[in-house]
Image (spheres, grey):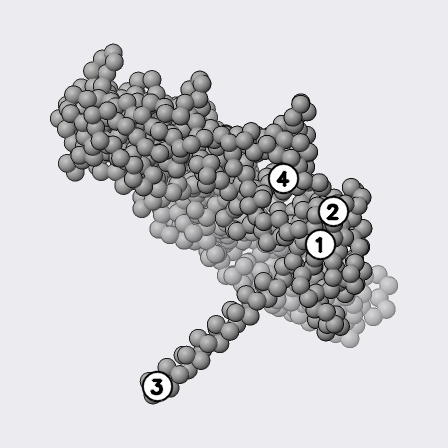
């Protein structure tokens, strides 16, 4: 089994290798071969055994049956790239490749001894003839070559031109990697260049060996070497240009691109180092340039380094923490610290982890690096240590303030805490700082919050401390800089919609409706439940706004209060309608609004309370539902189930069944009756009722030509349907009656019929009575 697995793995490896080899072949073949030759030159060979398969263009001419190509003769062809297909002799139809042809200008005459390379300035200067268009190339990391071209040389007895080159070139003239190319040539690494005689030019023919290399730096600025461990090491800027060193009585050596200095006697504070430069190399900071410059280097006997990371640029409050070890720890109070020639104030000194940490004010820094020098003594003080660090731009602070669940806000709330979102800084952290009597801050598990002071007024910027948490305590809480969000924010109250609706269902609602009973006890009206209260309690109901229960965190509430009273028939009582905006703040005493306008039993009171969707007032005002109240109460003032009332009835077709001579339709009649009926839970009358009363009518009996007004007592039942003003004194109804009549007055034929049955419809007006 293991053998089979090994075989499969080997096959897979071979397959991958074959694929990679194919890709490499394809990539290698994708680049066309390039031949470059000067205009007007002799024909050039395109390769042994190859011929041109097609006639070239751009002024190039195929000769000797296509075995050689003659360059163009016109100067306008310089720099132009043309292509021609070539193949082995006799194989043009089967296999051909693309050959690129570049016409160059005539070769210049260069005075190589005049070439000067100012390596630290990135400048190459040389003299010669025909320099216009000459290109200087150098290798890049990708294996290609970068280039710069002479555009307009200075005309003198001899032309002079300057090329821009990288500052990373070697300072040893013998190790130069620079090359020149004639005008119009392309800087292709594998191109073949021919001279005017049609011969291939070797690569060394284009090498530039500067006659002079000038360097500006051998040791870093404020050079020093720390010999606290016995041997100090100072990095060299151009070690390849240094042939040897002399350090007086100390045996210095060169190793790995650095200067190694053994510790000199204790009294030696500096050494003068003589550097011997290689042939043709000059130290250009001296006038005249020197081939054996002598540079002074400070001897450091204390180990110091900046442990707070890169110092911040462009801020006046920048600080750094310097760790001091070795002998200087004992007399740290005698040391002074310099940044260049400027004195750096010591802010704080801490001892931890067998080292001393010094906090320095570095102020506004604008250089990419910072050198901090520790000296002992006054005047020409002895340098005992140098610490270097890089600098970085101060982080740009942009913050967002929000209360969870609500949109970001452009102010600092003074009634509740808000979350502050700020950028993160690699290798450090930003800590929101409080400002006394303006705002307070907290940090909980990396979440920063802010709350303004209730007495603060005006606008303020948020302040952040720049800290490095990897420093030993208590330096990990030290502000190495104070940064500000440029956005200025007001300090004011944040108004959030309080949970009016939810609290109305709790034991301690923010707003409630209560009514006092006959004993003066308050009864709470529950939202969504319609209680029936006695009509006598109509003046004891009120809306209570409990300001003492409103948390200041919700700010000021802007509420819309609506109260309306509906009659029994559903029509509103206009004089009782209330629509008012209530501004509610936290306080110690409740606010009360009384309910008015209940005038008749079974009047319905409806109270609605909602938040005003004002974007200028509330955070998240767009999320407030404006179509429905936050909470609603309803109360019906009426508890009776039976009603006795008096009304008038105007017959519209009553028929009296009496004797043969006294029966007929009653006309010109009116009745005053009392009606007893039941009521439903909303106070609406039942359809049937017991009726009794008196009726005055003119009786038309048979053919009697002179009817007289009569009065009779009626008793029976009636069906009544209110059509207007239900339950009010002006109630109008249509009725159907069935009565027994007892005649009270009458004469003539009417006297013969003391009792009769009356049946038929009528219209009644009025409803004056009582409910019980």
Sequence-wise first label, 4 or 1: 1
Cα gap from disc 1 to disc 3, whole angstroms: 59 Å
Badge 4: residue crowd in 10 Å (few <14, some 14–19, many ≥20): many
Q: Are marks 3 and 4 in contact (CB under 8 Å)?
A: no
Q: Nearer the viewer, mark 4 or mark 1?
A: 1
Does any portion of residue 10 appear in the rendered image?
A: yes
- Where, by quadrant of the figure, is residue 130 drawn? top right
The residue under the point 35% across, 29% down is 276
Question: Badges 1 and 2: C-beta atoms under 8 Å apart?
Answer: yes
Q: Is mark 1 on a helix, strand or loop?
A: strand
Residue 369 percent location from the top left of the image: 38, 30
**Residue holding disc 1:** 44
Nearer the camera: disc 3 or disc 4: 4
- What is the spatial separation of the Cα atoms under label 1 and label 2, in whole angstroms? 9 Å
What's the distance in space between the residues labelled 2 and 4, CA to CA? 20 Å
Q: Please give the label number shown on residue 41.
A: 2
- Give how far across and how far down residue 75 sits, in percent: 78, 41
Give the SS element for disc 4: strand
State how far apart marks 3 and 4 are (Cα): 61 Å
Q: 13 and 465: which one is in front?
A: 13
Q: Name the residue under label 4.
A: 135
Graded by Cα atoms within 10 Å as few (under 14), some (14 to 19) or many (20 or more), the crowding at tag 3 reads few
Q: Badge 3 is on which residue?
A: 3
Along the viewing direction, whichever of 578 and 36 lies nearer the viewer: 36
């Amino acid at each position: 089994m293991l053998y089979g697995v090994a075989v499969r793995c080997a096959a897979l490896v071979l397959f991958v290798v074959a694929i990679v080899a194919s890709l490499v072949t394809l990539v290698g073949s994708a680049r066309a071969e390039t031949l470059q030759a000067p205009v007007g030159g002799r024909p050039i060979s395109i390769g042994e055994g190859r011929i041109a398969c097609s006639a070239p263009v751009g002024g190039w001419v195929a000769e000797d049956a296509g075995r050689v190509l003659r360059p163009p003769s016109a100067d306008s062809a310089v720099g132009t790239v043309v292509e021609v297909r070539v193949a082995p002799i006799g194989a043009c139809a089967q296999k051909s490749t693309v050959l690129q042809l570049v016409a160059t200008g005539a070769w210049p005459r260069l005075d190589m001894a005049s070439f000067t390379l100012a390596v630290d300035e990135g400048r190459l200067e040389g003299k010669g003839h025909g320099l216009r268009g000459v290109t200087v190339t150098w290798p890049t990391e990708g294996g290609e070559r970068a280039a710069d071209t002479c555009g307009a040389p200075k005309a003198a007895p001899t032309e002079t031109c300057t090329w821009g080159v990288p500052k990373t070139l070697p300072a040893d003239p013998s190790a130069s990697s620079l090359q020149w190319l004639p005008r119009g040539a392309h800087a292709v690494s594998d191109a073949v260049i021919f001279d005017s005689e049609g011969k291939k030019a070797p690569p060394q023919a284009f090498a530039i060996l500067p006659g002079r290399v000038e360097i500006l730096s051998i040791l870093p600025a404020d050079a020093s070497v720390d010999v606290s461990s016995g041997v100090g090491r100072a990095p060299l800027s151009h070690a390849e240009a240094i042939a040897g060193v002399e350090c007086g009585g100390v045996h210095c050596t060169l190793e790995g691109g650095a200067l190694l200095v053994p510790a000199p006697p204790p009294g030696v504070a500096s050494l003068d180092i003589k550097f011997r430069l290689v042939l043709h190399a000059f130290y250009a900071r001296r006038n005249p340039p020197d081939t054996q410059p002598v540079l002074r280097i400070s001897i450091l006997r204390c180990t110091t380094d900046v442990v707070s990371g890169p110092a911040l640029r462009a801020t006046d409050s920048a600080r750094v923490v310097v760790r001091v070890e070795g002998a200087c720890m004992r007399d740290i109070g005698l040391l002074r610290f310099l940044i260049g020639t400027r004195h750096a104030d010591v802010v704080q000194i801490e001892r931890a982890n067998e080292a001393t940490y010094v906090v320095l004010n570095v102020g506004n820094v604008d250089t990419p690096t910072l050198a901090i020098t520790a000296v002992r003594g006054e005047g020409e003080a002895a340098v005992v240590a140098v610490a270097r660090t890089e600098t970085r731009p101060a982080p740009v602070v942009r913050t967002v303030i929000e209360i969870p669940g609500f949109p970001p806000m452009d102010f600092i709330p003074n009634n509740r805490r808000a979350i502050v979102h700020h950028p993160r800084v690699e290798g450090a952290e930003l800590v929101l700082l409080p400002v006394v009597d303006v705002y307070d801050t907290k940090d909980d598990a990396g979440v920063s919050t802010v709350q303004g002071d209730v007495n603060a007024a005006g606008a303020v910027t948020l302040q952040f401390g720049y800290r490095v948490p990897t420093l030993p305590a208590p330096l990990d809480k030290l502000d190495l800089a104070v940064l500000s969000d440029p956005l200025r924010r007001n300090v004011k109250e944040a108004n959030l919609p309080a949970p009016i609706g939810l609290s109305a269902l709790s034991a301690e609602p923010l707003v409630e409706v209560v009514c006092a009973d006959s004993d003066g006890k308050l009864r709470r009206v529950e939202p969504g439940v319609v209680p029936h209260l006695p009509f006598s309690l109509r003046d004891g109901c009120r809306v209570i706004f409990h300001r003492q229960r409103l948390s200041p965190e919700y700010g000021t509430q802007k509420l819309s209060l609506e109260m309306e009273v509906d009659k029994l028939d559903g029509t509103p009582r206009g004089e009782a309608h209330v629509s008012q905006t209530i501004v509610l703040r936290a306080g110690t005493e409740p606010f009360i609004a009384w309910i008015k306008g209940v005038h008749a039993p079974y009047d319905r009171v409806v109270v609605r309370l909602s938040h005003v969707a004002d974007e200028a007032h509330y955070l998240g005002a767009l999320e407030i539902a404006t179509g429905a109240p936050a909470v609603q109460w309803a109360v019906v003032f009426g508890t009776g189930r039976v009603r006795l009332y008096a009304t008038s009835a105007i017959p519209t077709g009553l028929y009296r069944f009496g004797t043969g001579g006294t029966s007929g339709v009653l006309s010109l009649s009116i009745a005053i009756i009392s009606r007893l009926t039941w009521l439903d839970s909303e106070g609406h009358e039942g359809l049937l009722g017991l009726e009794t009363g008196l009726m005055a009518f003119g009786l038309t009996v048979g053919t009697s030509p002179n009817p007289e007004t009569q009065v009779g007592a009626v008793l029976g039942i009636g069906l009544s349907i209110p059509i207007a003003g239900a339950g009010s004194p002006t109630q109008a109804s249509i009725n159907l009656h069935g009565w027994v009549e007892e005649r009270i007055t009458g004469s003539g034929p009417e006297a013969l019929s003391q009792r009769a049955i009356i049946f038929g419809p009528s219209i009644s007006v009025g409803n004056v009575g009582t409910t019980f």
